[in-house]
Amino acid sequence: MATNTAGMTPDQMRDPNHFPGFIKGIPLGIQHILAMFVSNVTPAVIIAGAAGFGFGSPDIGPMIYMIQMSMVFAGIATLLQTVSVGPFGARLPIVQGTSFAFLPVMIPIVAGKGVDAMAILMGGIVAGGIFHFFLGTFIGRIRNWLPPLVTGLIVLMIGLALISVGIKYAAGGAADFQMAADDFGGLKNWTMAGTVILVTLILKFFTKGMLSVAAVLIGLIAGYVVAYFMGEVNFGNIAKAGDYMIPNPMHFGLQFSIAAVVGMCLMSIISAIETVGDVSGITKGGAGREATDREISGATYADGIGTAVAGVFGGLPNTSFSQNVGLVAMTGIMSRHVVTLGALFLIACGFFPKVGAAISTIPIEVLGGGVIVMFGMVAAAGVSLLADVNWTRRNLVIFAIALSVGLGLQLVPTAMQHLPDQAKILMTSGLLPAAFIAILLNALMPEDEENAASAHLRSGHGGSEGGDDAGYAKADYAKADYGRADYDTPHRSDVDGDYQDRQYRDAPRHDDEYDRPHRDVQYDDGYDRRPRYDDQPRYDNPDYDRRPRYDDRPHDDRPRYDDGYDDRPRDPRGPRR
């Protein structure tokens, strides 16, 4: 059997259990870590900054610890996915990492309250992880609650909630004392941030392969070099850091509050849906098959366990990382053992505090440039999901109300000043009210049949109605991860859309002017074998019209019509994909 450039047969590349050996496996595993490294440690930096012990504070020891735990428990959760223990884990090349999705809920919990607020946050993370674990028993039943209208709105709200953080970081910092500084928003700050953005864009648009996948990481390195020559890099924290660090259970303690527990449990539902999409994306992109129920439930169990255990040791919530789904599709290598090697490397980095201390030397302005790109792409991923929605009057009203209330409460938190503190935290996050309103209205409001039918004709296919079960498959990955947005990851709708194209292409094509599906069966001999039901001339077979089809025009010049049907002349070369 033929082998590819990696020295593996196609069957070996599609086999999750194949191990290509250490010589090939180690660089492939480290490649996965490089693709997710920045996204994995950034939430710890943001939470530390929001609490008041981040960049520029007198004691950044707790931030360095959180950075280390982000690496350790992302690696452990990844091992659980790739190696698995009983039913826990998907036994697929799934990379786990710290989730951006929880940030809009976590930031209000700790904002300005210092290290003392971390115990409440960790209690919410542990409770959310346990709840996430139990979602694995019935995850398939709740997918219908989150069609593209809802998931797209939620992902868009996550991005919009975090973009202001990126701007503040790029201008000089998000803490009050940083924003009050005279040089906040100065040219020097934006030069460092702009370098990161510029290099990232160049690599994304003009390179391929690993350079494009790791564009944000390379952009941060470029910005770091510029900051060094501008005298903005201080290596003092590296010398102060210890040689090794063992995870400390109950490092921040555990306290439970209603706001933290409810907020983390609700966001766990979004994270679980995201994991389902990533598992499906890996099996389709790498092996060309659907994910099994065992793989989906196992991945969800592992998500919950990883989050709960991380909370006990002072880490943040974990979830599957979508950018690594794109890396699997790009390399075509499905080996879970490759990702296992990468997870071991990530854990090893987490045990050495000097790694976290080195990350802490990155100027806040440089990190801000990367955050602007990442969070902006999160919002763009939400818009991409919303593109799959049929915008009937019903769906427009649902979207308008949910977005207005959610974004409005986020921008004007004093509007909820008379609520109890716990309720105020939940409401001013903006994300949870928007998600609740969208889900509730989508379930209760009747379908707008007239407008839905016209949208069907305009799009030429069923599309994804606000409450449509089948439509959800197009936005199944939801995370839109916000993690996926950082890299060249194939959208799941591309895969599902191809499946729908095959359905239309293989449907019988009648000669009735009112019955014209998108595509018909076409054969290599260039003849139209559609059943004919009129009195037109026939050839040797009375049931089929074997008139040859000729079309010398380029594909892109073929006419399309507003009725949603494809009236192009047939192409003797076969179906157009």
Image: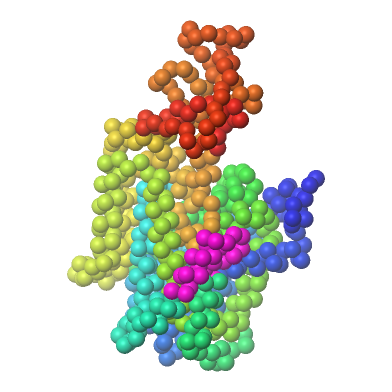
Image location of residue 174, percent across then percent down: 36, 78
Nearest the camera: 573 or 368?
A: 573
Q: Quadrant of the C terminus?
A: top right
* Most frequent secondary structure within the magenta stretch: helix
Q: Quadrant of the N terminus?
A: top right
Asked which quadrant contains residue 393, the reply is top left
Nearest the camera: 71 or 118?
A: 71
Left/right of residue 478 with respect to residue 284 in the rendered view = left
Q: Is residue 537 above or below residue 423?
A: above
Q: Name which residue lies at 53% across and 35% down.
A: 554
Q: Name which residue lies at 33% across and 32% down.
A: 453
Left/right of residue 552 with respect to residue 16 in the rendered view = left
Q: Is residue 574 above or below residue 47?
A: above
Image location of residue 237, percent across then percent down: 52, 89
Colour setting: rainbow
- One can see residue 436 in this view: yes
- The stretch in magenta equals 194-217
Image location of residue 411, percent across then percent down: 26, 67
Q: Is residue 213 magenta?
A: yes
Nearest the camera: 342 or 214?
A: 214
- One can see residue 173 in this view: no
Asked which quadrant contains residue 47, the reply is bottom left
